[in-house]
Image (cartoon, rainbow, N blue to C red):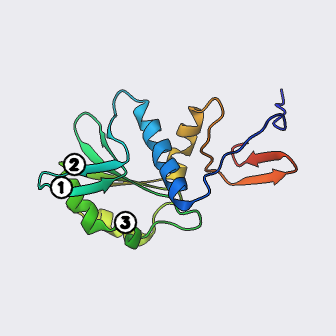
Amino acid sequence: MRTDYTKKAHIAFPTSAYRRGSAFEYLILSYYNLFSAVKVEEWSSCVYGKSGKLYQCDGILHDGSKRYLFEAKFFQNRAASIRDMHPERREAAATDIDCDGILCISLNGFDDSVREWQRKSPLEIILLGWEDLRIHILSRISEFSTVLLDNISIFDRLAISASG
């Protein structure tokens, strides 16, 4: 059965880089929030550490035994680099807010400089690309979603993504 996508088809793209990044953070945290084994303790917000310092964080996840500072990177045309990650700040924030590690997710993966940080960091650094999560997240979306991360081709009034 073929669905006619031309009837009232709407695609909502955030126009600013900031909003695209925020939508990406929300999509990933919403996905993790569906699982009983993972608790989203903080959504994008500012959090005070034990030291009294205020940190902006994309989120904090708890898997029942470990807490992870969540960091999302949404670069449409490149992998995230070490300059984007600011490892010293991330590690200091994670330690000060009692996180055991840092979960980093990037739309286009990570370059070798980030993987080097992952190997050398005293904290557990988990690196996931959109491709690692894509099939799992898309399998949970059954209706219209306002976050579109796949490349699309537009034909007249029809938009087709890589996932169909």
> At numbered mark 1, what does the secondary structure look like: helix, strand or loop?
helix
Amino acid tagged 3: Met
Identify the secondary structure beneath mark 2. Answer: loop
Circle 1: residue type:
Thr
**Location of mark 1 (residue):** 95
* Marked residue nearer the N-terminal end (3 or 2): 3
Rendering coords of residue 14 (x, y %): 60, 52
Q: Is residue 136 above or below residue 151?
A: above
Q: Residues within 10 Å of mark 3 (few under 14, many from 20)?
A: some
Q: Gap in Å between the C-alphas at discs 3 and 2?
A: 17 Å
Residue 18 falls left or right of residue 122: right
Closer to the camera in the image, 150 or 143: 143
Distance from the alpha carbon under mark 3 to that under mark 1: 16 Å
CB under 8 Å between discs 3 and 1: no
Kindly identify the residue that appears in the image at 63 percent across and 29 percent down.
142
126 vs 59, nearest the viewer: 59
Residue drawn at x 38%, y 47% as measured from the top left: 44
Q: Report the residue marked by disc 3.
A: 85
**Secondary element type, mark 3:** helix
Please give the residue where the numbered disc 2 appears in the rendered image: 99
In depth, the one of 81 and 113 nearer the eye is: 81
Q: Nearer the viewer, residue 90 or 120?
A: 90
Q: Are marks 2 and 1 in contact (CB under 8 Å)?
A: yes
Q: Tell me, yes or no, if residue 124 can be seen here.
A: no
Q: Residue 56: x, y in percent?
A: 31, 55
Amino acid under label 2?
Answer: Cys
Residue found 26% across the figure and 56% down from its top: 55
Q: Position of residue 45 (x, y in %)?
A: 34, 48
* On-image quarter of the N terminus: top right
Q: Residue furthest left?
A: 51
Which percent across, then down, holds residue 143?
65, 30
